[in-house]
Image: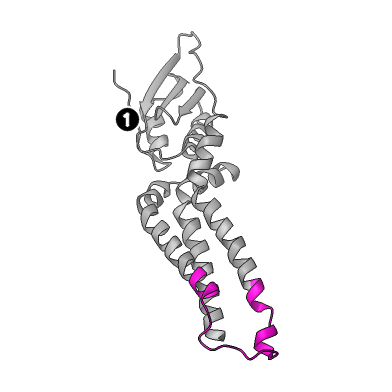
Amino acid sequence: MDKSKALQKATLGGSLLAAVIASLCCIGPLLAVAFGLGGFAASAVFEKWRPVFLGVTFALLALAWYLTYRKPKESCEEGSACATKPAGKWNKVVLWIATGIVLLTTAFPSLSSVILRGTQSSVPGAVAGDNSVVLKVEIPSMDCAACAVSIQTKMRKLAGVITASVNYDTKEAEVQYDATKLAPEKIIAAIDETGFKAEPANK
């Protein structure tokens, strides 16, 4: 019985961990923004392995459900200590809570895209000026709106950038900058540092 409980806890913990890792592709960029970091370069790596971690997540969660709700092999005699032990009830409560957390975590990339898509700034119009230049690039590897926010934040911190906007729906970025202070190659290199490769938009 003790081994069964230990296995149940291990599968629940493993499921939660795998769910978090599977969603790091979008959680990472948001944490990078929250802590003032330039980007989350490993985001694309986690996105690549997301299907694998999701498979592990739900396999472990299914095992936890089986261990919790399976019928015991040995029946307890009525009135005995094992028949009145309340541990099973709490195990089920923990299981339901953990399942909710897992589902929210695995759905986070989609949920963040819906929420953040509405908060993204629209692409601003270029301000006329002798030194003002607009660079448009494509970032096809962006996998959620959180990545767009991370890249946009990094662009706005570059010296020489006047305005910057990254659109997740079109997978494009528009950066207005002072050509005397910044080169387009440095802008593209800064985007690449976030883990998402940028390429000039079709001319």
Q: Find out whether residue 69 is within the magenta segment.
A: yes
Residue 34: where, in percent of width, then height? Answer: 60, 43
Asked if one can make out residue 160 in the rendered structure from this viewpoint, the answer is: no
Residue drawn at x 52%, y 84% as measured from the top left:
3
Residue at image coords 45%, 28%: 167
Front one among 109 and 28: 109
166 displayed left or right of 94: left
Q: Amino acid at mark 1?
A: Glu
Task: Left or right? Give the position of 202 relative to 189.
Answer: left
Which residue is more in the foreground, 35 or 172? 172
136 relative to 102 in the view: left or right: left
Residue 81, percent from left and from top: 69, 89
- Residue 51 showing in the rendered view: yes
Q: Picture coordinates of residue 14 (x, y %)?
A: 49, 67
The residue carrying mark 1 is 199
Looking at this rendering, what residue extends furthest in the front direction? 78
Helix, strand or loop at mark 1: strand
Position of residue 89 relative to residue 165, above or below, is below
Q: Which residues are magenta?
A: 65-90
Residue 88 to residue 99: above or below: below
Neighbor class of circle 1 (other Cα within 10 Å; few <14, some 14-19, many 20+) is some
